[in-house]
Image (cartoon, rainbow, N blue to C red):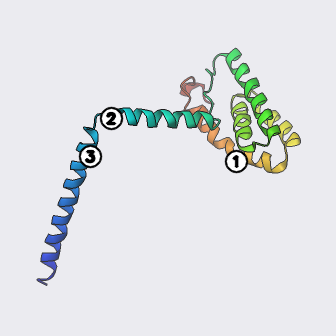
Amino acid sequence: MMGGKPSAIAAGVCGAIFIGYCIYFDRKRRSDPSFKTRLRERRKKQRAAQNKSGLAQLPDLKDAAAVQKFFLDEIQQGEELLAQGDYEKGVDHLTNAIAVCGQPQQLLQVLQQTLPPPVFQMLLTKLPTISQRIVSSPGLEEDDVE
């Protein structure tokens, strides 16, 4: 029974040393003069990568003209990308268009007839993610969601 107590003390000391090192390292990292600038640059790159991935900024859903322009732009970009063979980004743009469409069922029927089955299936798998973005969109209040 006596062999367990020294090992427990050793484990506690090692844990305390590890936590102390973590605190020291974090302070050293945060006090680095270029830490904040590198952090801002990294976040800016992440935002740029997110914008390039097809996650376009949704328009104000109460402004009909902005929604219509966004819809037409997204359909056009999606068609162009699909024609070039970039199915992933093309589907992203079509999904954005479906998200703001007033009659998404009719648009889905048209797309089902015109798109190859694997591309249409890819479109269907991305629809839940875009509906999440619509619900959390700043231009839409909870009272507007049916």
Determine which quarter of the picture holds residue 135.
Answer: top right
Residue type marked 2? Ser
Determine which quarter of the picture holds residue 5.
Answer: bottom left
Whether residue 2 sits left or right of residue 78 in the image: it is left
Q: Position of residue 145 (x, y in %)?
A: 60, 29
Secondary structure, mark 3, is helix
- The residue identified by callout 3 is 26
Quick one: quadrant of the C terminus? top right
Secondary structure, mark 2, is loop
Q: CA distance from mark 2 to mark 3?
A: 14 Å
Q: CA distance from mark 2 to mark 1?
A: 42 Å
Between disc 2 and disc 1, whose residue precedes?
2
The residue at 17%/73% (across/down) is 8
Disc assigned to residue 34: 2
Determine which quarter of the picture holds residue 108.
Answer: top right
Asked if 57 appears above or below 15 in the picture, the reply is above
The residue at 79%/33% (across/down) is 80
Label 3: few (<14), some (14–19) or many (≥20) C-alpha neighbours in 10 Å: few
Label 2: few (<14), some (14–19) or many (≥20) C-alpha neighbours in 10 Å: few
Residue type marked 3? Asp
Whether residue 90 sits left or right of residue 111 in the image: it is left
Q: Mark 2 or mark 1, which is nearer to you?
A: 2
Disc assigned to residue 125: 1
25, 76: nearer the viewer: 25
